Image (cartoon, coloured by chain):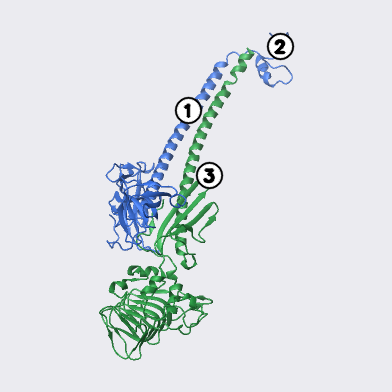
Amino acid sequence: MFPETSARSRPSARRVREGAGLNRHGPPYTGPRDGHTFIEVIVVLLALSIITAVSAASLTTVTRLGRIAGDEAERLAARRTFALLVAWEVGSLMPGPDGLQLSADTFALRAFRGRGVVCAVGSTTRLNYRGLRAPDATKDSLLVLEGRTAEHTLPYTGGAWSPGSCVAPAGEQTLEVTTPGLDLHDIVLFFERGSYHIANGALRYRRGPGGRQPVTADVFVPDSTRLGLSIASKTWGIADTAGLDLRIATEPVPPSSAPSVWPLRVPIRNTRVPLDSATDSAT
Amino acid sequence: MSTHARGRGGSALLAVIAALVVAELLVLGLWRIAAGSVAAARESAAHDRMRIEAESALRDAIASWDEAATPAQPAGIWYVVPGSTRSAGSVHLAVEAIAVYRGVRLLRSTASVVANGGVRARAAAEASLSVVPADEFWRDFHSAVVSGGDVGIAAGDTVDGTNAGTPSPWTAAECPPSALPAFGPRPGLALAAGANLTGAGGTLAGAPPLLNGAARAAPSDFDRVGGVDAPDFRLIADRFETGSITLASASAGSACDTGRRGNWGEPAIPGNPCHDYFPIVYSASDLSIGAGEGQGILIVDGNLRIAAGVRFYGAILVRGLVDAAGAEVHGSVRISGTAGPSRLGGAFRYEECALERAFRLAPGLRRLYRVSDRWWLPSF
């Protein structure tokens, strides 16, 4: 295979192979490389195995961390929803007239779902309405705020949208109602009777005698999550306030084994202090 | 054979590329999860912040409400509260109001934001409050003295409803004729049915000098003043006083020092920083004024004693008895007490100039107050 040369000048096969990549002066060696393919395959397989193992471990770790983070995010979101919802529902209540009833894991109340201002009376009564949903005669009642008369309730007997019949501000729609007894410029709140429950680890809402629908994920620890009424003289110029004490406990976050507890006080603004029970209390 | 060698040489590179792709996908997945969490957190934070901003704006509007500075608005029409609209960065705030019943206002504040990343959030807060209609005060304080119980007047005492002139040392500068209701002569002493005048020798004047069976003199009529129920008196009060007090105005430079005890304004010195200060003063129990001068609207949930030499300009409601000796009251007095005769020693004159200034300038009648327990409304 090699041209005839002396033994001294003839390169060894090893040198030739080494020179194939390094010798810039001679032609590269392109001959066969018998006997090394298997080793390279082994090396490649080994490398692939390592990469696969590392990738799998990374994937497992990332998945686990993602699940933990997702669970924690769910707990935090449920906790926030719990607090905001209770604050919104309770903050504008009058505990007595609105029938606020508390136990450690339940509170029942008038749940306000809309507000209207009567804009026309006569042959028909119309009001400008804004709310969480459309009024529903099968669910709703009316609370007429104090004005010409003392505050009182009326049944909501139904109505139909009547666009353009009153000048409605942005976000409001004109509703023609069949309920008698409303006066011009009456402020009317639409409400339904409802109750919130901490059951099966979730905050649930029940309208009237209906089923309890979850409004949060089931992340609460029922034995540790509690509601309580607190009475305090917090005066800020307009009114004294009472408050609803929340103790929201969510499932433990590993590696902790104890529930994560979040105490919170939600003001009840429409309350004079003291209430009927003149001492601090928790029910 | 050389071609075969070149083909095998790329397998490791492919494996590395595949591994990098897998790693990249993992990173991208993590990034998307993190980005989603950040977006959700931003939205939650923006919503929470707007809720707080809306409630704060509503409270600001209530706290800074000045009915006298608010242009008259037709009932049933929403209007933007002057000075309530403002923008801070990407946050926009506005407070609107609508007049409904007499004096009642429904207020609605909205806060909205379009933050970086396109996060939009909006929240609102609503409250129903009231201003005190001044004409209700005019109806209540219709005579020099209105009493639900017996009243005693001795020689030298005067109860005068003639409503003539401007109280000294005031001039037309304080009471321009165009601002006055020009009622003309009013009753001097107006007594509830069954109440009696005792004593002799005093002077009664007015049209008529003595009115028996007067309107707004029944016991329940003293449970309200200006349309405000007794439990709410403290809500419209500018000052709280009780016990014994000496009246003296106090100023700090060119400002009236309204925090000083006993400062019920300065009626005697036009141009004084406290000359236009007409506080609503509320005493939850008996009150004794030992000396000095004051002005405004005084509400006493108990008995009132006024010593000789005390001068007062404005309206007084006493839900008990009055014991005055040598006092001077310019305006009108209502007394509910029936447990004994009230002693009206001194001069009690109906003067609409003093009443007009008190009803127009009392800070408590220019603010919003809670008309009923339900004032904070759910917002949608």
Can the viewer see residue A118 in this picture?
no
Q: What element carries label 3?
A: helix
Residue type highlighted by circle 3: Gly
For the N terminus of chain A, the image quarter is top right
Q: Mark 3 points at which residue?
A: B118
Which percent across, then down, holds residue A267? 37, 57
* Residue B349 location, quadrant: bottom left
Q: Mark 1 points at which residue?
A: A53
Which percent across, then down, holds residue B90? 54, 51
* Residue A65 location, quadrant: top left
Residue type highlighted by circle 2: Ala
User: In whole angstroms, how far apart are the C-alphas of marks 2 and 3?
Assistant: 81 Å
Mark nearest the camera among 2 and 3 is 3
For the C terminus of chain A, the image quarter is bottom left
Q: Residues within 10 Å of mark 3 (few under 14, many from 20)?
A: few
Q: Residues within 10 Å of mark 2 (few under 14, many from 20)?
A: few
Colour that chain A carries in the picture: blue
User: In whole angstroms, how far apart are the C-alphas of marks 1 and 3?
Assistant: 41 Å
Q: Is mark 1 on a helix, strand or loop?
A: helix
Chain letter of the residue beneath label 2 in the structure image: A
Q: Is label 1 on the same chain as label 2? A: yes
Which percent across, then down, holds residue B51? 45, 52
Colour that chain B carries in the picture: green
Q: Is mark 2 on a helix, strand or loop?
A: loop
Mark 1–mark 3 CB contact (< 8 Å): no
Q: Name the residue under label 2.
A: A7
